[in-house]
Image: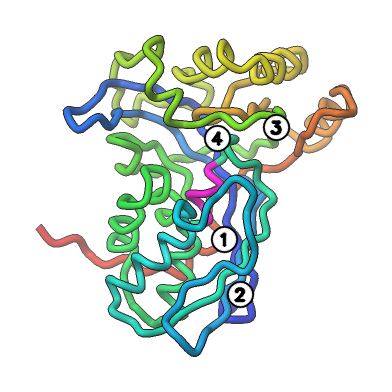
Amino acid sequence: MTTWDWTSDWPAPAKINLFLHVTGRRDDGYHTLQTAFRFLDLADSLRFSPRNDTMIVRTHDIPGVAVNQDLVIKAAQLLQSVCATQQGVSITVKKRLPMGGGLGGGSSDAATTLIALNQLWTCALDTHQLQALGLRLGADVPVFIHGKSCFAEGVGEQFSDIQIPPTWYLLVAPPVSVPTEEIFRAPELSRDTPVIAPNQWHFGFGHNDMEPVAASRYPQVAAALSQLRALGPARMSGSGACCFAEFATESQALNAQRQLPADIVSFVTPGVDRHPLLATTTTSPRHS
């Protein structure tokens, strides 16, 4: 078993949405969704270093992400406040996941920050408590703390674990960042897809309601989908921009990747059913 400590590089894996239905919009403006999350063997990594003061500092700038908008910094500040700790931390983020790509990179980084500092600061919060904190940061954060492939609903924070066949994915990262808020606010976004029960979902079911919106507004997304669909069934993940095609084997995925134009940024990666940090969180019974 891996030992996670101050010397570790803590992984923050990508996710994809195998389908994403927008089923409504609440009075508070949040959209209700149904989706299936799967993690990928593709990740950012974070390094945490203790400080002799209470400051929370990132060690380098991230293009396009101001410090006061950085979910990693917000996560550390939130946990520091909730746990009433006087410990500070310096945080180094090594980005591999495209930003604005629909792979949950910023949310995953925030979740890993909560998981790591919960242990390193000995806060002793359980999984449900960490998920509640994560939801205050963003709707995609809790699934990375849940840590397993799942069917999700609500605003994306109510989980039912699912079994997904072993699958390899060819991801294409178009040269564009798609703002999630823009897609959610789009008047043309379908918001009335019928609700299904979790046990009605099966692998290959459904569609992504956000895909036609992003593809019509961003030609790069439409082009990526077209390139992938020439090789196999393809979808967009989340609100975009990344798109993926599914294959049964690594060799099939690699063969498809070789058929893409050389200037296309792409990745071949397997799906994984468990977050690499799942064993570092503890689950306590819910109290009614």
The CA distance from mark 1 to mark 4 is 20 Å
Q: Residue at x 28, y 79 (%)?
A: 84
**Amino acid type, mark 3:** Ala
Residue 18 on the magenta segment? no
Tell which circle, 1 or 3, labels the residue nearer the N-terminal end. Answer: 3
User: Dot 3, crowdedness within 10 Å: few (<14), some or many (≥20)?
Assistant: many
Mark 2 or mark 3, which is nearer to you? Answer: 3
Closest to the observer, 81 or 196: 81
Q: What stretch of residues is rendered in magenta?
A: 104-109
Are there few (<14), some (14-19), or many (20+) residues within 10 Å of tag 1?
A: some
The structure residue drawn at horizontal position 68% and vertical position 25%, both measured from the top left corner, is 245
Three-letter amino acid code at the position of disc 1: Pro
**Residue 85 pos. (x, y %):** 33, 82
Q: How many neighbours does mark 2 have within 10 angstroms: few (below 14), some (14-19), or many (20 or more)?
A: few
Residue 276 has which mark? 1
Q: Quadrant of the N terminus?
A: bottom right
Question: Quarter of the image holding residue 12?
Answer: bottom right
The numbered dot on residue 2 is 2
Residue that appears at 59% across and 52% down? 13
Q: CA distance from mark 4 to mark 3?
A: 10 Å
